Amino acid sequence: MVGLSQKAPAVLEAISALKGKVSQITLQYPERRNALSSAMVSALQGCVSQLHEMVKEGQCRGVLLRSTVEGTFCAGADLKERASHQPADIIRFGDSVRGLIDSMARLPVPVVAAINGAALGGGAELSLGADFRAVSGRASMGFPETGLGIIPGVGGTQRTLRLIGPPRTKLLLFTGRRLTGEEAVDWGLADILSDDPEEAALEILEQSLQKAPLALAAAKAAVDDGFEVPFSKGMAFERAYYAQLFNTEDRIEALQAFAEKRPPKFQGR
């Protein structure tokens, strides 16, 4: 038994409809509304660690992050569990959650979160570790932490700031306002509004499967690394990642496919 459930709070599996090249992490902990308990975080760490290995071996080229709990993506911290923790324990646990989200964000493949319910506090922060967020009209996103005497502590202030800017970030933090799915897209906290966010997420991932894996990894690295540095250094990153692709088999294959008027067959080499 894991926590209150007889099944793991989060599981990793391949999506057969996409030739097994896309994997999905499913949050499935209804007793705690997918809260970030110790059991949930441990399960997610295992999933993300396995994904890094699968990507290295060419077994995974995209990731869907989803929930099967009705009305909930992730409710944030497990406050019942946290009540028994000492401040030092909470800080250490926060470090592990931050490391989990950072590790997911560093996966060199597209990661898309499908949100069809509440993504609050740590749940919103978890979703911000994805490259994109597809939301439905039933989704909500927000940071209630200041009402609990704290602030978002696993990337919420910084990732939100970089997406929507200081004033709107402060508004969410100061008021605890929950954005609807439509508002989240309008504000830039989410990217796609759909009646079926999983289908919308899978459409993105399916399109990415038609592209060269090494080029996708380089594009993601160039954007993520370049965002944190001055423009001139970002341009240097772009040049370096661009140059790394010239001797790849996939680049040669793309040129040959273009000449032969056929779709390229990329191998990630």
Image (cartoon, helix red, strand yellow):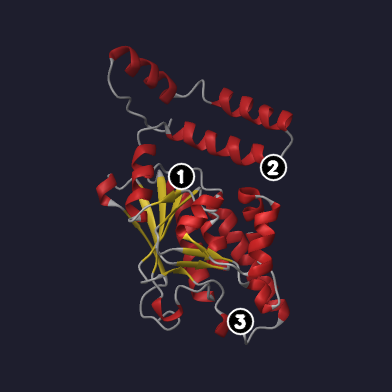
- Regarding residue 153, the answer to whether it shows in the image is no
Tell me the kind of residue under disc 3: Arg
Q: Mark 1 and 3 residues: CB-CB less than 8 Å, in contact?
A: no
Q: Mark 2 and 3 residues: CB-CB less than 8 Å, in contact?
A: no
Give coordinates of residue 44: x percent, y percent. Answer: 48, 64
Residue 86 found in image quarter? bottom right
The answer for how far apart the CA atoms under marks 1 and 3 are is: 32 Å
Looking at the picture, does residue 81 appear above or below residue 49? below
Give coordinates of residue 110: x percent, y percent. Answer: 46, 44
Question: Looking at the image, which residue is at 56% across and 48% down?
Answer: 106
Mark positioned earlier in the residue sequence (2 or 3): 3
The residue that disc 2 covers is 228
Mark positioned earlier in the residue sequence (2 or 1): 1
The residue that disc 1 covers is 110
User: Which disc, if any, is residue 81?
Assistant: none
Say which element carries label 2.
Answer: loop
Question: Looking at the image, which residue is at 59% across and 65% down?
Answer: 97
The residue that disc 3 covers is 82
Horizontal side of residue 95 vs 50, given as left or right: right
Extreme-bottom residue of the structure: 84
Question: Looking at the image, which residue is at 41% across and 18% down?
Answer: 252
